[in-house]
Image (cartoon, rainbow, N blue to C red):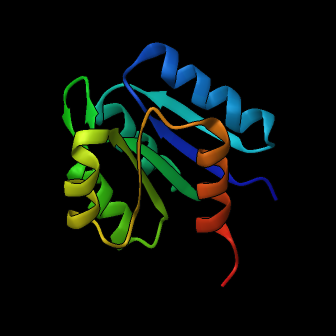
Amino acid sequence: MVLRILIAEDEYIAAFDLCDTFEEAGYEVEGPHAGISSVMLACQKDKPDCAILDIELADGLTYELAQKLIDENVPVILHSERADALAVAARFPGATTLAKPCPPADLLNAVSRVLAPV
């Protein structure tokens, strides 16, 4: 079974780097999505196995979506600017928070950890 990773990132180069990283690692990638409405629609169509969310997308913050996914037991990795990372981690203690820029290996390791069977 191929696991599906949802990617919400509005920086073009970063978004496609994330997609390439996870596709090369054998995941199915949904995205990248640069806007909240696009990523929310994707989640409604097919719930992902894991979501990597930039906190601030082109049209707003992903806090509501992050909480909705957490409530639905979808592992969430919040990818934000370093200055925001501590505040985001405090707001979403059930999520993994990584500060940008983040090496691809760290993102892959984070996804492996959150998807590992308990």
Residue occupying image coordinates x 69% and y 26% = 20
Residue occupying image coordinates x 31% and y 56% = 66
Residue 38 at x, y = what percent?
Answer: 36, 32
Q: Nearer the viewer, residue 87 or 3?
A: 87
**107 up-or-down from 72: above or below:** above
Q: Nearer the viewer, residue 104 or 25?
A: 104
Q: Quadrant of the C terminus?
A: bottom right
Residue 1 at x, y = what percent?
Answer: 82, 59
**46 up-or-down from 9: above or below:** below
Residue 102 at x, y = what percent?
Answer: 51, 37
Location of residue 24 (image quadrant):
top right
Residue reaching furthest to the bottom: 118
The mark total stands at: 0
Residue occupying image coordinates x 36% and y 23% = 10
Location of residue 110 (image quadrant):
bottom right
**87 up-or-down from 91: above or below:** above
Residue occupying image coordinates x 29% and y 49% = 85
Residue reaching furthest to the top: 13
**12 up-or-down from 5: above or below:** above
Residue 32 at x, y = what percent?
Answer: 50, 28
- Relative placement, left or right, of 27 versus 44 is right
Location of residue 27 (image quadrant):
top right
- Relative placement, left or right, of 114 versus 78 is right
